[in-house]
Each structure stands twice: as C-alpha cells, then as structure tokens.
Image (tube, rainbow, N blue to C red):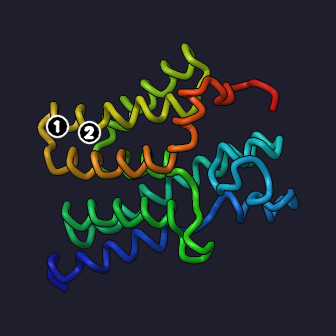
C-alpha cells in the first residue's frame, strides 16, 4: 500500500484507538460508580479522580496518553509523517467523540499530550512544564491545560514545524471548545481548584 493510500487507514486507526474509553473501562473493572453519572460526566482522568481513586485516575491518564502515542507511532511507521499527523487527528477526535458512547467522550488533554509525544516529544515536555507551572500558581487544572495548549502551536511553529503547528492549532481549538464550560466558570470565578473539596 502506498503512503497516500494509507492516509485514510491512518485516520481510522487513530480514531479507533482514540475512542477506547479507558476511564470508563478501568472504573468498571474496579467496580466503582458509573463514571458518566458523577462530576462532569466525561470519561477522562479528571473525572476518574472524582471517584476518589487516585491510582485509577493516573492509570486513565497514562492509557489515554499512550493510545494517542501508539496511533501516531504505528501510522508513522507504515505511512510516514503525513499518516502520523492524520492518526493524531483521528485519535484526538476519537477520544472527544467516541462512536461507542454516542460521541460523548473526554476533553482531550491526555490524548493531546500523547500525540505530542509521538510527533515531537520536546513539545510534550514544554506542555507538561507549562501545565505544572500554571497549576502551581493558579491551582486550576483547566486553566493549566488551556495555557499549555495555547502555547504549543506557537512553540512548534517557532522551532520550524509549520505542519505540526497547524495540526495543533486545530487540536487546541477543539480542546478550548471542549473546555467551554470550564472557561465560563473561570470567568465567573466558580471553577473548582486542584485539591479543593467539592
């Protein structure tokens, strides 16, 4: 199969891997309450943390990141850089809008990091450092993700990766969209802080 013919396969592969709802799977295996019935109702690590199971939340974060990385690495190996980028887009969309869960998924932060690792790992390091710095000063997880994702395309463009910068500009816009309620709460001063009791 030529690299061009592999491109749609790469996107579908990414989507299918990205749509695996690890948060839901892990919490069900652990016998906790249905993840979709608590907190924000989404399937990401932040909501898993609301079950009180820090280990499950960490496992969800890692698995959600790695499914993005795996999609990029596999697609890149068989189809080259363009296939890797399409797989990254597919994985991100799969996590946000999984077909198995009526297109109601997570907010995408872990998968964003995972595909960054697969495509240009220094940018993933920068993302995590920015997230940690913002979280330490503001204690807002959502704000930390928004700041880090906003800077990521700029970082990629600055270091000579215009195609990746364009891709992550799209992913950042999607991430902001998925955090639209968090943004409203941040503006209103009602967003929950890291470590605060709910």
Q: Quadrant of residue 87?
A: bottom left
Q: Which mark is residue 153?
A: 2
User: Relative to the observer, which residue lies in front, 114 or 77?
Assistant: 114
Residue 33 point in image, percent of width and height: 86, 58
Q: Name the residue carrying label 1.
A: 157
Element under label 2? helix
Residue at 16 percent across and 33 percent down: it is 159
Q: Secondary structure at mark 1?
A: helix
Residue 73 seen in the figure: no
On screen, residue 92 above or below 101: above
> For the view shown, which residue lies furthest in the front direction?
188
44 or 128: nearer the eye? 44
Q: Quadrant of the C terminus?
A: top right
Report the disc number at residue 121: none
Please name whichever residue, 9 or 187, is drawn nearer the observer in this view of the structure: 187
- Left/right placement of residue 115 relative to residue 131 reads left
Residue 16 visible? The answer is yes
Tell me the quarter of the image containing the N terminus.
bottom left
Work out how far the residue at label 2 is from the one at label 1, CA to CA, in angstroms: 6 Å
The crowd level at tag 1 (other Cα within 10 Å; few <14, some 14-19, many 20+) is: some
Residue found at x 24% / y 67%: 83
Residue 19 drawn at (x, y percent): 53, 68
Q: Position of residue 140 (x, y in %)?
A: 59, 26
The quarter of the picture where residue 52 lies is top right
Q: Residue at x 60, y 33 (%)?
A: 185
Residue sitting at 38 percent across and 46 percent down? Answer: 117
């Amino acid at each position: 199969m030529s690299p061009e013919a592999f491109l749609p396969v790469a996107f579908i592969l990414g989507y299918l891997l990205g749509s695996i709802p690890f948060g839901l799977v892990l919490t069900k295996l652990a016998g906790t309450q249905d993840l979709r019935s608590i907190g924000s109702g989404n399937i990401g690590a932040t909501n898993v943390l609301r079950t009180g199971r820090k280990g499950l939340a960490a496992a969800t974060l890692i698995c959600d990141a790695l499914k993005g990385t795996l999609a990029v690495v596999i697609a890149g190996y068989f189809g080259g850089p363009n296939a890797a980028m399409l797989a990254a887009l597919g994985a991100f969309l799969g996590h946000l809008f999984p077909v198995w869960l009526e297109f109601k998924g997570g907010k995408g932060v872990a998968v964003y990091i995972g595909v960054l690792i697969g495509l240009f790992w220094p940018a993933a390091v920068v993302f995590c450092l920015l997230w940690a710095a913002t979280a330490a000063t503001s204690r807002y997880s959502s704000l930390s993700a928004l700041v880090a994702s906003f800077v990521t395309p700029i970082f990629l463009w600055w270091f000579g990766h215009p195609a990746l910068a364009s891709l992550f500009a799209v992913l950042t816009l999607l991430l902001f969209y998925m955090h639209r309620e968090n943004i409203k709460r941040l503006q209103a001063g009602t967003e929950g802080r890291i470590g605060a009791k709910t």
